[in-house]
Each structure stands twice: as structure tokens, then as C-alpha cells.
Amino acid sequence: MRILLAAPDRDLLMTYKRLFELDSYTVTAVFDVPQAAVHIGEQRFDLAIVDRSLPRGGSKEILKRLNEKEIPSVLLIEHKITPNDLLEYSAASSYISYPFFPYELKERAAEVLEKAGSKETLSVGESEINVSKFRSSDGTRFTNEEINILRAIKNGDKFDVRHISSYINALNNKFERMKKKTRVKYVLNEGYRLVNENE
């Protein structure tokens, strides 16, 4: 498995590089947008881990290039995840906010890679989500965490997602933009469930 790791803090970058190499990943480490763009153009990666504060161009350009090549990504964010983050940086497949433990990053990367290799189609109300591409048939992007939430609600499973309210708000915003009637709503004594917007 090949990973592109892009972050401006060189000490942290080298730490993460060694962390993944211990698990036999092949890791390309870069410090800014131009370096990342060159490697994305020249190599094929199974996953990219990108810090949002990447200098000399910003991470949005890199996420766009990764999305065009259908390379899943984990975006590292320096603060608590908000609904605006999930909509503004919608090209990312997953998000993790600082501070986090190294094992959390490894687990998140493994989860995103697993979904990228999936053949599952998740039916949610009027929408069909291609899990491996992290998007619906109309091109709307869904994150790893949003897919986990929707799958758990459909199956009646319990789930534990950090920043749950941000993801729920972003999901409902996406369904509204898609002009779908499906919404995620918290129901007393039942928890989160899928409803029609008029319920």
C-alpha cells in the first residue's frame, strides 16, 4: 500500500512516516502543495493523509487533485470539526482533528482504505452511496464518518463518532442540497433515525 503524507511540521511528518512504515506501508512524505502536486501527478497512491494547513497553495488544491484521481484522503484539522469544515472541504474522505494519538490516525487510515476497497452500495432513503468512491450517484461526497453513521442508523446499531452533531448537521445539509426528503433526526428514547423532512 502506498501512502502520500503531506504536512508542514517536518518532525511530526517524519514521525508519522516511520509509524506507517512499521506496518509495511510505502510512504512518500512532502511538506507543501507543490511537492504534493508533483507526486500525485507522477505516482499512484492508495491513500493520502493531508494537513489542512499545508503551505504554498493550501490543501483544497491537493484534495481536488486527489479527488480527480479517486485517491481517498484523510484531512488533518487543527481544531474541533465543524459542519462548515465538512462542507467546505467536502473532497476529503475522512477528517481527524488535533490532538490525536498515533494509533487513532493508523486506525482511521485503515478504515478509509477498507472502504476504498469495498463493493458496497449504501441505500439511504432516495440516495445510493457508492462506499468505495465516498459519493452518491449525483456526485455528492460523503465522508467515512458519515457513511458509518448512516449505516449504523439503518442497521439499528450503536455508534460512537466524535463531533457527532457536526456530522449530522452536514448530512442534513447535503440531503437538502441534493433535494432529497431524507433527514437524520434525534428521536427521544430512540436515538438518531432516518426520517422524511416533514416528520
Image (spheres, helix red, strand yellow):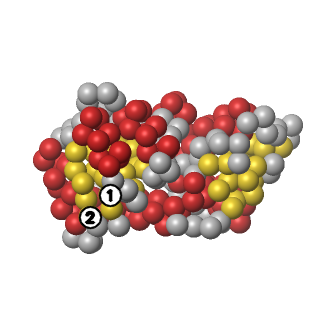
At x 53%, y 38%, the residue is 90
Assign a secondary structure to mark 1.
strand
In this view, the residue in front, 181 or 1, is 1
Badge 1 vs badge 2, beta-carbon distance below 8 Å: yes
At x 57%, y 54%, the residue is 133
Residue type highlighted by circle 2: Thr
> Where does label 2 land, which residue?
26
* Residue 182 x/y as whole percent: 78, 44
Separation of marks 1 and 2 at Cα, in angstroms: 6 Å
Q: Is residue 118 visible?
A: yes
Above or below for 45 versus 141: below
* Residue 160 x/y as whole percent: 53, 58
Residue furthest out toward the left:
11
Residue furthest out toward the top:
57
* Residue 119 x/y as whole percent: 62, 67
Residue furthest out toward the front:
42
In this view, the residue in front, 76 or 189, is 76
Q: Which of marks 1 and 2 is nearer the N terminus?
A: 1
Assign a secondary structure to mark 2.
strand
Quadrant in which residue 7 is drawn: top left
Q: Is residue 78 visible?
A: no
Residue type highlighted by circle 1: Ile
Q: Is residue 58 left or right of residue 145?
A: left
At x 64%, y 41%, the residue is 140
Quadrant in which residue 171 is drawn: top right
The C terminus - image quarter? top right
Q: In this view, does 11 lie to the left or right of 129?
A: left
At x 51%, y 61%, the residue is 116
In this view, the residue in front, 113 or 148, is 113
Q: In this view, does 88 lie to the left or right of 136?
A: left
> Where does label 1 land, which residue?
3
